[in-house]
């Protein structure tokens, strides 16, 4: 990186602190430098021409918007701009194209490619590093919404995203973090009534059971392969 991009300030960490803490290190540096906004971009994502300018323009023109997310385009043709949460069923819904409006109001946008107003981070803080990875972006957006900021996905800011290119190398850890962090985020941000239903009836129980069974199966197969 130093050879190819000598003007880039490279932040070296002594070890792998995973996504939330690693992103926080970069965001702290940006805030210290007095930046107006911070862009998060995953290592398996690529900004398409003009996308960053569109995201910046949205923040400049709409002071009430605190976080904007890009339109993520995946190799399988799936396109997403963010997600909404149904607190009564603990389900997550992604607004599907075609998007008639350039700005789509959502509950949260993906940390894959999000532009965050610095005032938001100074008000509510950075990622909760105890999440490690997965749903830390949802938690951040929920805290921003609670502080009065709007969260939007931007139709005209495309970003190509390979999708879990890094996480798939650690499938077991990925499954565990997804299940744990969704339950934790739900219990932190859901209204009292849905939160009670979650505890009593486990509305996400089928998903969590499926995740657990898949994790056990994969671990068993890999263990047998290792023994061979």
Image (cartoon, helix red, strand yellow):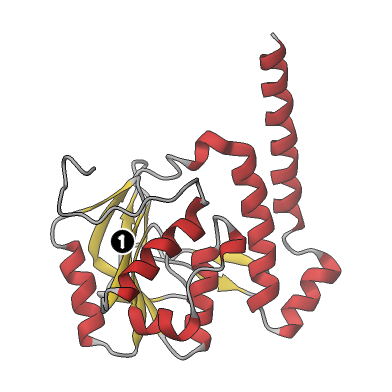
Q: Quadrant of residue 8?
A: bottom left
- Residue 60 picture location, percent across and down: 21, 84
Furthest residue in direction front, as rendered: 14
* On screen, residue 89 above or below 178: below
Q: Is residue 66 left or right of residue 22?
A: left
- Residue 115 picture location, percent across and down: 32, 70
Residue at the image position 63 percent from the left and 69 percent from the top: 185
Location of the N terminus by quadrant is top left
Q: Is residue 37 left or right of residue 106?
A: left
Residue at the image position 21 percent from the left and 74 percent from the top: 56
Q: Is residue 119 visible?
A: yes
- Residue 135 picture location, percent across and down: 55, 62
Furthest residue in direction top, as rendered: 228
Q: Quadrant of residue 170?
A: top right
Q: Quadrant of residue 121?
A: bottom left
Q: Secondary structure at mark 1?
A: strand
Location of the C terminus by quadrant is top right
Using the image as rendered, state which of residue 226 and residue 201 is in the foreground.
226
Using the image as rendered, state which of residue 23 and residue 110 is in the foreground.
23
Which residue matches tag 1? 71
Residue at the image position 59 percent from the left and 37 percent from the top: 171
């Amino acid at each position: 990186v130093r050879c190819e991009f000598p003007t880039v300030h490279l932040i070296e960490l002594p070890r792998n602190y995973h996504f939330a803490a690693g992103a926080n290190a970069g965001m702290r540096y940006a805030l210290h430098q007095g930046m107006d906004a911070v862009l998060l971009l995953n290592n398996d994502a690529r900004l398409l021409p003009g996308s960053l300018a569109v995201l910046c323009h949205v923040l400049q023109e709409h002071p009430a918007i605190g976080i904007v997310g890009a339109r993520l385009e995946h190799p399988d043709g799936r396109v997403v701009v963010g997600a909404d949460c149904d607190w009564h069923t603990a389900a997550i819904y992604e607004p599907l194209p075609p998007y008639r409006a350039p700005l789509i109001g959502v509950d949260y946008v993906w940390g894959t490619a999000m532009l965050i107003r610095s005032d938001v981070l100074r008000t509510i803080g950075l990622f909760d590093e105890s999440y490690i990875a997965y749903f830390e972006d949802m938690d951040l957006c929920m805290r921003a919404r609670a502080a009065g900021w709007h969260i939007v996905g931007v139709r005209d800011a495309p970003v190509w995203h390979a999708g879990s290119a890094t996480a798939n190398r650690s499938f077991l850890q990925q499954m565990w973090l997804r299940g744990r962090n969704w339950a934790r985020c739900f219990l932190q941000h859901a209204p009292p009534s849905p939160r009670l239903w979650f505890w009593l009836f486990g509305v996400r129980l089928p998903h969590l059971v499926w995740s657990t069974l898949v994790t056990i199966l994969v671990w068993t197969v890999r263990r047998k392969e290792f023994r061979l």
